[in-house]
Image (cartoon, grey):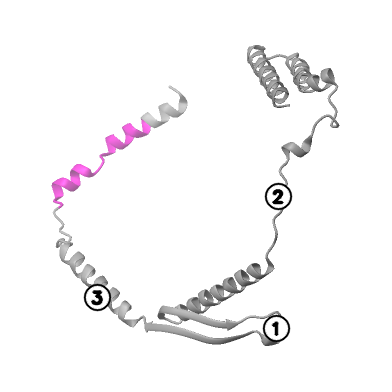
Amino acid sequence: MIKFLSNWAKSIGFSIIIVSVLEMILPENKIKKYIKMVMGTYILFSMLSPFVENKLNSENIDFENYIETSSTEVNQESMDKRIKELYIQELEKNITNKVQEKGYIVKKCKVDATITDNVNDTKINKISLKVEPEEEKEKEKNENIEGKLVTEIQKIKEVNTSIVEKNTKEEKEKTKLTRNTKKGVKRVFKRRIRGE
């Protein structure tokens, strides 16, 4: 049976390689889609031919040898225990997040709960929290920020921001356009607009 499957896989792989090579060689034209259809039929035939030749039916194959049957028993007690543990862990995470939102650092959070199938008997027996105010941490952050700001401010160099007018009459006259210059610029633009 293994030999049969091995030969079958080889023939399929060989036919796919042949079709791929032929597809790369084909020129781009209207006939290509029909040739692709014929090649697809060839691949399909190569897949089905071993079954048709050997007249192999599902009665001849002993599937029991190839399929492993494994029975897994579900231990309900262990599942219930794990669910209870997860529930308590989620309670601890939720409590920790709520306390941290109020501005405290949670060092330790432990929940002791009794969880049963009956909702009325389920209860939280004890919650142990070890908490510190976050003010100390904030003070350290503020001191670090202030120190960094002071050092950055000290790095800034003094910049002269005064405005001095040094333009003399000669410089103003140099920057003014004369009437002749203005007329020349107008002429150039008019010529360009006309296409000359």
Distance, label 3 to label 2, CA atoms, is: 64 Å
Distance, label 3 to label 1, CA atoms, is: 51 Å
Q: Is residue 118 magenta?
A: no
Residue at numbered disc 2: 70
Residue at numbered disc 3: 143
Amino acid found under the numbered disc labelled 2: Ser
Residue at numbered disc 1: 119
Q: Position of residue 176 (x, y in %)?
A: 24, 44
Start and end of the magenta stretch? 167-187
- On residue 64, the disc is none
User: Could you say whether the residue bearing mark 1 is in a helix, strand or loop?
Assistant: helix
**Image-based side of 117 in relation to 187, left or right:** right
Q: Position of residue 154 (x, y in %)?
A: 16, 66
- Asked if residue 53 is positioned above or below residue 165 in the image, the reply reads above
- Whichever of labels 3 and 2 marks the residue nearer the N terminus, that label is 2
Amino acid found under the numbered disc labelled 3: Glu
Front position in the image: 146 or 100:
100
Q: Which quadrant of the structure image shows residue 38?
A: top right
